Image (cartoon, grey):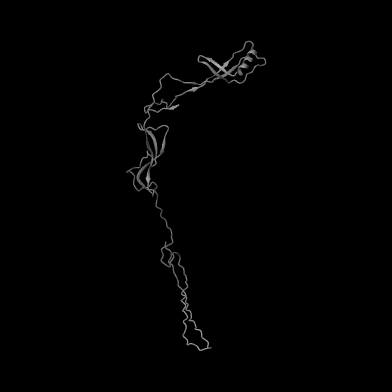
Amino acid sequence: MAEVERPADAGVDFSELRVIHTEGEYQFQASTGYFGTDATAYLRYLDELLLADELYLVTDKGHRPLQLLTSTLVDEYDDADLVARTFSFRILDTVENFSVLPAAAPVPLRATRWRGVSLVPILDAYGKRTGKLVFQRLEQVYADDASLVKPYTVKANAPGDPDYIPPIVDHSILVGSTPYPSAAIVRAGTFRRTTCGAGFLGGRPRSASKPAATGPRSPAMPTPWPKPSTGASIPRPTPMPTAAARLTTRLSTWPSST
């Protein structure tokens, strides 16, 4: 079978499938008819026919090889009146159609092109329309009448492909609009301030105490003493007392803002 292109003015009886080659085989049955006399001798002869290595059918085309499909044979029945047998054969050589018409001239190849399908808008990084459209896929059609090529052929419209169709500008599109419309949501809420000044935290007021730093210890300054005489004890200088103070501060925080 072959597909035939359907003309534009073809009727409903036009077939798009055409037979270009037919091949078959023959089978037939042969009956012996009723044996009037000597039925037993004829049945023994048919036994030999079943066991033959090669069988041929004599026709006007010559001897055609046969295959015997019958595999069983009953030689004798009790109280049989008339005896007859039937055999099935298959002709082994194949039969093909032919025509006396001259061979048709080869049909020249038709030019084809690629046509864009599935046109979609191009969006920016924020999901908004840019005013341009691009084809997602390309399908192959004939250049003369734009009919589809059989079998149907389609591919992606990808940059770098020799048949790539670049985006087109559509002035009817509002640039900046979005195909994903949304509605504003307004409702009350709370948050904690994070921009408080130094020493303040957002939240409920609280008190904190901080111990003051201990003052520096004054170094012990030796008091000049006269050089003692031999055998006298040397008095040690008394260190100055350490000054210590505790400073208590109260820090207040601002209440959190809403």
Q: Residue at x 57, y 16 (%)?
A: 30
The correct choice, above or below, for 158 with respect to 150 in the image is below
Residue 191 picture location, percent across and down: 43, 60
User: In which quadrant will I find the C terminus?
Assistant: bottom left
Left/right placement of residue 84 relative to residue 196 reads right
Q: Farthest residue to the right: give it.
A: 78
Q: Is residue 82 visible?
A: no
Q: Quadrant of residue 90?
A: top right
Q: Farthest residue to the left: give it.
A: 171
Q: Residue at x 59, y 17 (%)?
A: 86
The correct choice, above or below, for 144 with respect to 123 in the image is above
Compare residues 200 and 105 and report the one nearer the observer.
Answer: 105
Q: Residue at x 54, y 18 (%)?
A: 65
Compare residues 193 and 144 and report the one nearer the observer.
Answer: 144
User: In which quadrant will I find the N terminus?
Assistant: top left
Q: Farthest residue to the front: give it.
A: 230
Q: How many marks?
A: 0
Residue 84 picture location, percent across and down: 61, 15
Q: Is residue 41 visible?
A: yes
Compare residues 184 and 162 and report the one nearer the observer.
Answer: 162
Residue 62 picture location, percent across and down: 52, 15
Q: Quadrant of residue 31?
A: top right
Q: Residue at x 39, y 36 (%)?
A: 139
Residue 165 picture location, percent across and down: 36, 40
Compare residues 30 and 235 and report the one nearer the observer.
Answer: 235
